[in-house]
Amino acid sequence: MDVLPVLVTIGSFKLYSYGVVFFIALFLGLYYWWKMGRDENLEETSLFDTYFLALAGFFVGARAGYVVLNLSDFENIYRVLGFVAFPGLSFLSGGVVAIGVVILLANSYDWEIWKVLDNFAASLGIVLVFGSVASLLSRGLLIIEIMTFVWAVFYFVIINRVRKNFRFYQWYRNDRSVAPEGLASYLAIGFVGLWLILRGILEDSWRFYGVSYYIVLGVVVVLGACLLIYWRSGRALLKNKER
């Protein structure tokens, strides 16, 4: 059921809700990213460069991932490039590319990688919330879109809370005097796995021995995130305690 795919129509000109709301999402994401970076005394020009280059990587990766997964809907290059008129982005593939860009640039600027990734994971939350609203407006009240919106709200609230308070988590700090950054980033990975599992439950998709490949991949991602958090907390199992 369509909700509001087109905001304004003037003659042949159409202003699509997807494009408008997604622009708002990106603007708010930039504000969050800039504010957190400024609080860390990072150079503002480098912050903006990192955000916009990561954004470019996100769009390329997200659109490419969506097109690959829905090839039957894209019979010409116009549909592939027209993401506003023919909306659709794979947040998973886009996020992987964007994170790769952030890591490369943070390393080149000599920033603390984990602190930057935690900030990026937190700022990504507001983009996901408004991005899911954009999908709801343009694609309709589909169960996947509704689930993604609810998931994005929980992601935004929990990841931002963890980023601010991780130093006070005794279970994470273990017996160290200072808890290391990175918990928000690894938890974000776990949230991605949860989204994959939920999608596999709600959507009829490709199967792996009778089980949705989304569920299989999601379980692997969640378990991987749990192991990474365990390792980051300095537990002895992986023989890598930080002092």
Image (cartoon, rainbow, N blue to C red):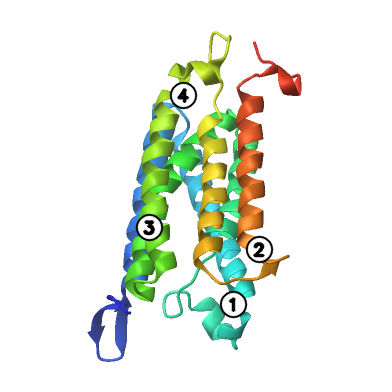
> Which numbered circle lies on residue 54?
none
Q: Give the secondary structure at mark 2.
A: strand
> Which numbered circle lies on residue 166?
4
- Where does residue 177 sit, x and y in percent of width and height? 54, 8
In which quadrant will I find the N terminus?
bottom left
> Which numbered circle lies on residue 70?
1
User: In the visual, does 5 lie left or right of 199?
Assistant: left
User: In the visual, does 156 lie left or right of 90?
Assistant: left
Sequence order check: which comes first, mark 4 or mark 2?
A: 4
Residue 15 visible here:
yes
Give the answer, above or below, for where 120 lies relative to 170: below
Alpha carbon of mark 2 to alpha carbon of mark 3: how far? 24 Å
- Where does residue 222 sit, x and y in percent of width and height? 60, 44
Alpha carbon of mark 1 to alpha carbon of mark 2: how far? 20 Å
Alpha carbon of mark 1 to alpha carbon of mark 3: how far? 21 Å
Residue 100 visible here:
no
Q: Amino acid type of disc 2?
A: Val
Q: Which residue is mark 3?
A: 149
Q: Within 10 angstroms of label 2, few (less than 14), some, or many (20 or more) residues? A: few
